Amino acid sequence: MSTAEFPPLPPPHVRLGVGGVLLQSGRALVNRAVYRTRFTIPGGYVEAGESLVGALAREFEEETGVTVRVGRLLLTYHKVLNAQESDVYFAFALDHLAGQPTARPPEIAEVREVSVAEAEGATWISGVSRTAIRLATQPSLAWPSSPWKGSDVPGVSVEAYHASGGEPDQRRHG
């Protein structure tokens, strides 16, 4: 079958989202945006030219005032919104570096530190966030190893094209 027999595909629109689980003393940090009814783990969308790790560190600090180090990948989630749009979401475990959690208006209405036991059954926390919190409490699973090095974030592949016209920088973290 030749490619001429296939109809053209519509241009895709994929939004990349990130979220992070910060656990301290058996408690997880969650927040509620002003436009949501349920709490989620802090995070947001990746901006053009930004890495997943960079976006998560930025979003977490913007929403909570806490500086974090991004750790292992906990889960990915893909949601098709309609024929032209979808969201791809990555949740990571985090380490606390500095700052005390506080709601950061105008986007964030409240932050809470909730026990892991309570979070697992709390219907006021989104299902994906509850799953990420549960996975963050489990021992680290082994991601496939790779010859590409360059970060301590396992399981994340990066391919960056530089405006200088040089060769792409390809790394698989792990």
Image: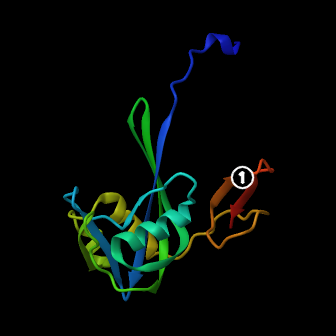
Q: Is mark 1 on a helix, strand or loop?
A: loop
Q: In which quarter of the image is residue 53?
A: bottom right
**Residue nearest the viewer, comparing 35 with 125:** 35
Q: Is residue 114 left or right of residue 96?
A: left
Would you say 70 lies left or right of 172 here? left
User: As displayed, is residue 139 above or below residue 173?
Assistant: below
Tell whether 92 sits left or right of 126: right
Crowd rating for badge 1 (residues with CA inside 10 Å; few <14, some 14–19, many 20+): few
Quadrant where the image shows the N terminus? top right
Residue at 72%, 69% in the rendered image: 150
Find residue 170 and report its horizontal and vertical position in percent.
Answer: 74, 55
How many marks on residues?
1
What is the x, y in percent for residue 107? 27, 63
5 vs 109: above or below: above
Residue 134 appears anywhere in the view: no
Residue that sits furthest to the top in the current view: 5
In front of the other: 167 or 124: 167
Coordinates of residue 44 in the picture (x, y in percent): 40, 59
Residue that numbered label 1 is attached to: 162
Can residue 160 be seen here?
yes
Lateral position of residue 166 relative to residue 39, left or right = right
**Amino acid type, label 1:** His
The residue positioned 72% from the left and 59% from the top of the image is 171
Residue depicted at x 34% and y 86%: 100
Relative vertical location of residue 122 with respect to residue 5 in this rendering, above or below: below
- Indicate the quadrant containing the C terminus: top left, top right, bottom left or bottom right: bottom right
- Please name the colour scheme applied to the rendered image: rainbow
Residue 113: x and y in percent read 28, 80
Q: Is residue 24 above or below residue 155?
A: below
Q: Which residue of the protein is positioned furthest toward the bottom in this rendering?
A: 25
- Camera-side residue: 137 or 64? 64
Q: Which residue is drawn at 71% across and 13% down?
A: 2
